[in-house]
Image (cartoon, rainbow, N blue to C red):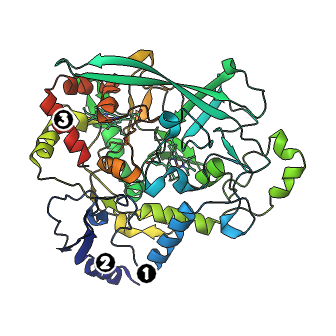
């Protein structure tokens, strides 16, 4: 099909946009007319949902072969993997952190972490978090790899379990309202081999990120981000963003995904390999191959020569994530939401949580070369600059600093988390844990942990009246 016909077809499909609101009623919008109370988040990829499946809907342009591949990718993403060598469903483990992408990213979101509810790995040994470990000098442990696998198939011991304890401190807003922050302390117990001395262990924990706008992020205009890095310097607020660059597949690229912008792509191959123990063309070796327990004979039968997941399947998972629609903003005519948006600007949140960016004209290219031109040339509202910011080391003696270096990102530097869809997290995943390790239990705590370059903005919020703070949060809930 030549480009013109493709484009015409595309316009026709967009002629009417159908969507469901919370009650399941159908809303039919003509020619991108936006249903009442909603606002576009990602141009023609915007979907109008306000329910538990809001993150998990294909964009309207997904049709034909893309639809088939989307469904296939969705299944591969969600289906519980097993140890059996039965085609695409097998290959789990021997040690693993999650049993499917969807186990940690439920409904394409952020599975409720067990850090608060079970104090770590808990009874079932499944946290949905990634537990990064290194030696104190930054080197990886030869037997363990990048993350601790707190789950294992029958007959194999998990590498270790995570325990979290919390230190609490009470604070007050100038108007007297109280809030409390909680600082996590992480510890690994039940090491499969007792070779790691606690004094040589460095550990940092991440809860999953929401899959809102993955395609748009991959299609983003890199030049615009680099210009932001060069220009967005606000000495009056102590803010200056910095781009992360990493070398992947031998090419130096701008980092866009992950909490430290430490990845240039959607880490499908890494997710299968490192998180689930599923070998693939990019990571053909079992993650646990160096481990004594795996090499001790009996387990060797479980390590098949063939790869656990094919490149075609992985591309379908990539396609699924990049073709997901981005939920529209809701309740945009509500008076509190409108005021809250003004407060967001007044507190200078937008200097990092940048409201409007653009995608590059050609859209995005998936990991095996399929192109998604529909993602191109769109105006998007991710509420992020995708740059790194020093978020401080002061609050409760540590701030958000985790001392973990990723590419150019230092311990105290984090990528501005995109806020699109954040207001739906409670509906989609049933919790309001925020920040990289889920230490914030609600929006107020998330904001009050902002230090370093976020300090001035945090203080502008802190000094607002209670009404203004509440309105700002009403605005966040509309994203
Ligand atoms: C054990 C839980 C777990 C499993 C299983 C898992 N992930 Fe993740 N995922 C995470 C965590 C935690 C992060 C944040 C990591 C970080 O930034 O350090 C993340 C980040 C991501 C990101 C970056 C998102 C962004 O906004 O930048 C993508 C994309 C992703 N995962 C895709 C996948 C895919 C695809 C699979 C399956 C092949 C998968 N994940 C399996 C926990 C998991
Ligand atoms: C200096 C840049 C900067 C400014 C200014 C800033 N933020 Fe952030 N924000 C970040 C970064 C970086 C993170 C990720 C920190 C982490 O996960 O440890 C973040 C995380 C968040 C989160 C948690 C998102 C999630 O899903 O976990 C919320 C909510 C948030 N910011 C809201 C705000 C609000 C509201 C303001 C204004 C009062 C604001 N931020 C100002 C950089 C900034």
Residue 475 place in picture, x, y as percent: 20, 43
Quadrant containing the N terminus is bottom left
Q: Are marks 2 and 1 in contact (CB under 8 Å)?
A: no
**Among the two numbered marks 1 and 3 on one chain, the one whose residue lies closer to the N terminus:** 1
Vertical arrangement, residue 20 with respect to residue 407, above or below: below
* 85 or 313: nearer the viewer: 85
Can I make out residue 408 in this image? no
Q: Quadrant of residue 6?
A: bottom left
Vertical arrangement, residue 272 with respect to residue 439, above or below: below
Residue 195 place in picture, x, y as percent: 78, 26
**Among the two numbered marks 3 and 2 on one chain, the one whose residue lies closer to the N terminus:** 2
Q: Secondary structure at mark 1?
A: loop
Q: In the image, which is nearer the foreground, mark 1 or mark 3?
A: 3
Which residue shows up at 49% across the image and 72% down it? 71
Which residue shows up at 21% across the image and 28% down it? 461
Identify the residue under disc 2.
10
Residue 421 place in picture, x, y as percent: 32, 51
Vertical arrangement, residue 449 with respect to residue 377, above or below: above
Identify the residue under disc 1.
64
Identify the residue under disc 3.
470
Farthest residue toward the right? 297
Q: Label 3 vs label 2: CA separation?
A: 41 Å
Q: Label 1 vs label 3: CA separation?
A: 45 Å
Residue 59 place in picture, x, y as percent: 35, 67
Mark 2, ligand 1, within 8 Å: the answer is no
Q: Quadrant of residue 303?
A: bottom right
Q: Are marks 1 and 3 in contact (CB under 8 Å)?
A: no
Q: In the image, which is nearer the foreground, mark 3 or mark 2?
A: 3
Vertical arrangement, residue 399 with respect to residue 272, above or below: above
Q: For this view, does 33 lie left or right of residue 354?
A: left
How would you rate the neighbour count of disc 1 (Cα within 10 Å): few for under 14, some for 14-19, many for 20 or more?
Answer: few
Q: Secondary structure at mark 2?
A: helix
């Amino acid at each position: 099909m030549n480009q013109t016909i493709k484009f015409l077809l595309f316009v026709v499909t967009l002629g009417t946009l159908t969507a469901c609101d919370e009650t399941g009623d159908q809303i039919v919008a003509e020619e991108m007319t936006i249903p009442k109370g909603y606002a576009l988040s990602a141009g023609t990829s915007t979907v109008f949902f306000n329910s538990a499946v809001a993150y998990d809907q294909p964009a309207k342009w997904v049709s034909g072969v893309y639809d088939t591949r989307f469904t296939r990718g969705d299944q591969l993403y969600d289906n519980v993997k097993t140890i059996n060598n039965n085609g695409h469903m097998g290959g789990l483990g021997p040690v693993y952190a999650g049993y499917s992408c969807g186990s940690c990213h439920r409904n394409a979101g952020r599975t409720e972490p067990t850090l608060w509810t079970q104090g770590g790995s808990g009874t079932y040994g499944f946290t949905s978090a990634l537990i990064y470990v290194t030696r104190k000098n930054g080197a990886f442990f030869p037997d363990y790899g990048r993350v601790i696998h707190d789950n294992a198939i029958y007959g194999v011991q998990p590498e270790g379990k995570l325990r979290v304890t919390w230190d609490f401190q009470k604070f007050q807003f100038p108007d007297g309202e109280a809030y409390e922050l909680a600082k996590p302390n992480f510890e690994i117990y039940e090491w499969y081999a007792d070779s790691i001395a606690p004094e040589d262990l460095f550990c940092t924990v991440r809860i999953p990120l929401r899959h809102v706008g993955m395609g748009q992020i991959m299609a983003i205009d890199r030049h615009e981000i680099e210009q932001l890095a060069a220009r967005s310097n606000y000495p009056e607020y102590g803010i200056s963003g910095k781009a992360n660059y990493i070398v992947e597949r031998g090419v130096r690229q701008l980092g866009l995904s992950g909490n430290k912008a430490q990845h240039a792509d959607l880490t499908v191959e890494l997710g299968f390999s490192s998180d689930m123990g599923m070998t693939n063309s990019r990571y053909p070796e079992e993650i646990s191959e160096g481990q004594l327990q795996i090499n001790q004979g009996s387990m060797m039968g479980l390590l098949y020569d063939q790869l656990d997941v094919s490149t075609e399947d992985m591309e379908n998972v990539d396609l699924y994530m990049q073709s997901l629609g981005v939920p529209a903003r809701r309740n945009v005519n509500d008076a509190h939401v409108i005021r809250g948006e003004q407060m967001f600007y007044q507190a200078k949140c937008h200097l990092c949580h940048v409201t409007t960016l653009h995608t590059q004209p050609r859209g995005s290219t998936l990991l095996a070369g399929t192109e998604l031109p529909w993602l191109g040339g769109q105006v998007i509202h991710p509420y992020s600059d995708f740059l790194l910011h020093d978020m401080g080391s002061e609050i409760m003696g540590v701030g958000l600093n985790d001392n973990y270096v990723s590419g150019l990102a230092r311990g105290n530097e984090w990528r501005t988390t995109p806020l699109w869809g954040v207001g739906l997290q409670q509906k989609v995943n049933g919790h309001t844990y925020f920040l990289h390790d889920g230490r914030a239990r609600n929006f107020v705590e998330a904001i009050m942990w902002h230090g370093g370059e976020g300090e001035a903005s945090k203080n502008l919020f802190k000094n607002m009246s209670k009404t203004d703070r509440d309105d700002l949060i009403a605005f966040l809930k509309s994203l």
